[in-house]
Image (cartoon, grey):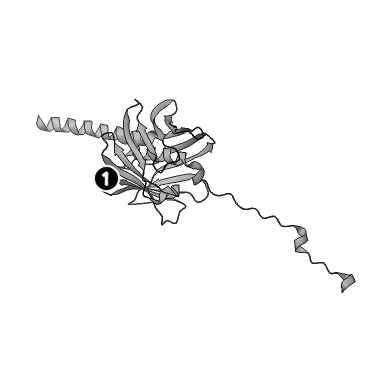
Amino acid sequence: MRLFCLFISLVIFSNVHSETTKDIKDTSMSVIKNSPFASYSSEFVFKNGDNNLGKVIRTGLCCPRYYYDLYNANNTFELRGITRFLSLGFFDPFLIDIDIYDNHSSYVGSIEGKIITRSRAKFSFVDVIGNVKAICYLDAKKFDFLIVSPQDELKIIAKIEGNTYGDVGLIDLKFLSNETNMNLGFLKIFAAFISDYQESFLPPPEEIHHYHESNHYHYYDWDNR
């Protein structure tokens, strides 16, 4: 009887785990930004089709600390990201650090911008005891972010890409793997943050040099030879 109960428990656990794993890859989402100019707060809504997947509310204006509050689909507060005051991110969003706290105000980890990197920007997702759970790289030529496993960077966890239209922006967060043990709330806060600073992460415009044909010719003054 005990063996039978153990077997049933294992089957149930396996099914629950499978559904949970399956849901991670299937919950790719769009992040819709509503950020009025010079507003104290901005809203970032997460949607999968017509399904509401929660939102992030950012508060703060022209100050060294911004708050990114994550709410689930039931409008229940889950996590808070606070940009770190004493960091180089005060001068450059590429180097910003965001400390993450749960709904009991307990520290649970951070998102950290790295100064030494071969890509245009690099961020690490770090848990409460300092373990890196994921690494994020910014594309060299466009607003695309790749989130990879720190153990094997060929294993892509997710990709973020999109556009901004002034006060309104739309980016897509696509999960490409189920094999991650990172807190997905961190990724939602990060998506809101890069959407908030999207103009900063766009590549600089290419310089166009105009050459006049006259510069390619040498004229000989026959009268003053």
Q: Name the residue under label 1.
A: 128
Provide the secondary structure element on which disc 1 rests. loop
User: In the image, is 103 to the left or to the right of 37?
Assistant: left
Using the image as rendered, state which of residue 39 and residue 23 is in the foreground. Answer: 39
Location of residue 110 by image quarter: top left
Extreme-bottom residue of the structure: 225
Tell me the amino acid under the disc marked 1: Val
Query: Residue at point 43% right, 42% down?
Result: 159
Quarter of the figure with the N terminus: top left
User: In the image, is 61 to the left or to the right of 185?
Assistant: right
Using the image as rendered, state which of residue 42 and residue 56 is in the foreground. Answer: 42
Extreme-front residue of the structure: 63
Using the image as rendered, state which of residue 208 and residue 38 is in the foreground. Answer: 38
Query: Residue at point 32% right, 27% down?
Result: 76
Query: Residue at point 78% right, 64% down?
Result: 217
Rendered location of residue 174, percent (x, y)? 42, 38
Location of residue 109 by image quarter: top left
Location of residue 17 by image quarter: top left
Q: Is residue 137 visible?
A: no
Using the image as rendered, state which of residue 155 and residue 76 is in the foreground. Answer: 76
Rendered location of residue 26, percent (x, y)? 38, 34
Rendered location of residue 53, percent (x, y)? 38, 29
Rendered location of residue 119, percent (x, y)? 45, 53
User: In the image, is 100 to the left or to the right of 191?
Assistant: left
User: In the image, is 157 to the left or to the right of 200?
Assistant: left
Quarter of the figure with the C terminus: bottom right
Q: Residues within 10 Å of mark 1 (few under 14, many from 20)?
A: some
Question: In the image, is residue 153 above or below residue 74?
Answer: below
